């Protein structure tokens, strides 16, 4: 039972995120039990949608769930009115990823070759190693306890 509870908690939605969504839609106060009910429903909805998208993915012998699999899962639940919202979210995500700087671009724009970058990294590792060796070891420290009674209390 304890393991089941931890497994349940691991797959839950972030409470703050769900609460923020609820507050954005609902300006009135919502009771805690009503919020918890919405959290659980949201989790179940996502699990159901994801598992159905996964089924479509497996049927097509694919390894990655695509947006088409999600669309098919939405269609299965006759929730076609969500298509526009999903399309907008996907388009916004695609725009975001196009403008988001990648780590590869950062290296390319540095003007250094891979060998130079590797050499720089090795120097940083050596400096960190040197710094760590200069830090005194706790085993080498002489620890003196003045008042044992204070610790016992």
Image (spheres, rainbow, N blue to C red):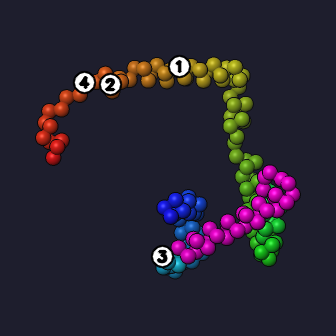
Q: Which mark is residue 139?
A: 2
Q: Disc 3 to disc 2, how far (Cα)?
A: 52 Å
- Residue 71 location (% of width, % of height): 81, 66
Circles 2 and 4, Cβ within 8 Å, touching? The answer is no
Circles 1 and 4, Cβ within 8 Å, touching? The answer is no
Q: Which mark is residue 32?
A: 3
Circles 3 and 2, Cβ within 8 Å, touching? The answer is no
Q: Is residue 49 above or below residue 104?
A: below
For residue 36, side relative to residue 117 (left or right)? left
Q: Please tell me whether mark 3 or mark 2 is closer to you in this view.
A: 2
Region rendered in magenta: 36-65
- Residue 14 location (% of width, % of height): 55, 62
Residue that badge 1 annotates: 126
Q: Secondary structure at mark 1?
A: helix
Q: Is residue 7 visible?
A: yes
Q: Which mark is residue 142?
A: 4
Circles 3 and 1, Cβ within 8 Å, touching? The answer is no
Q: Disc 3 to disc 1, how far (Cα)?
A: 54 Å
Query: Does the magenta portion include 62?
Result: yes
Q: Is residue 16 visible?
A: no
Q: Is residue 102 above or below residue 87?
A: above
Q: Disc 2 to disc 1, how far (Cα)?
A: 24 Å
Q: Secondary structure at mark 2?
A: helix
For residue 126, side relative to residue 81 (left or right)? left
- Looking at the rendering, which quadrant does residue 10 occupy? bottom right
């Amino acid at each position: 039972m304890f393991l089941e509870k931890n497994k349940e908690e691991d797959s839950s939605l972030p409470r703050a995120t769900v609460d923020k969504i609820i507050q954005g839609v609902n300006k009135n106060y919502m009771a805690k039990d009503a919020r918890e009910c919405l959290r659980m429903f949201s989790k179940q909805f996502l699990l159901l949608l994801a598992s159905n998208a996964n089924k479509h993915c497996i049927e097509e012998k694919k390894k990655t769930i695509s947006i088409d699999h999600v669309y098919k899962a939405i269609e299965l639940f006759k929730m076609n009115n969500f298509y526009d919202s999903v399309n907008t979210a996907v388009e916004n995500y695609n725009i975001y990823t196009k403008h988001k700087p990648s780590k590869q671009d950062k290296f390319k724009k540095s003007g250094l070759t891979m060998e130079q970058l590797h050499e720089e990294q090795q120097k940083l590792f050596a400096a960190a190693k040197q710094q760590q060796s200069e830090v005194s070891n706790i085993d080498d420290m002489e620890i003196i306890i003045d008042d044992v009674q204070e610790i016992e209390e």
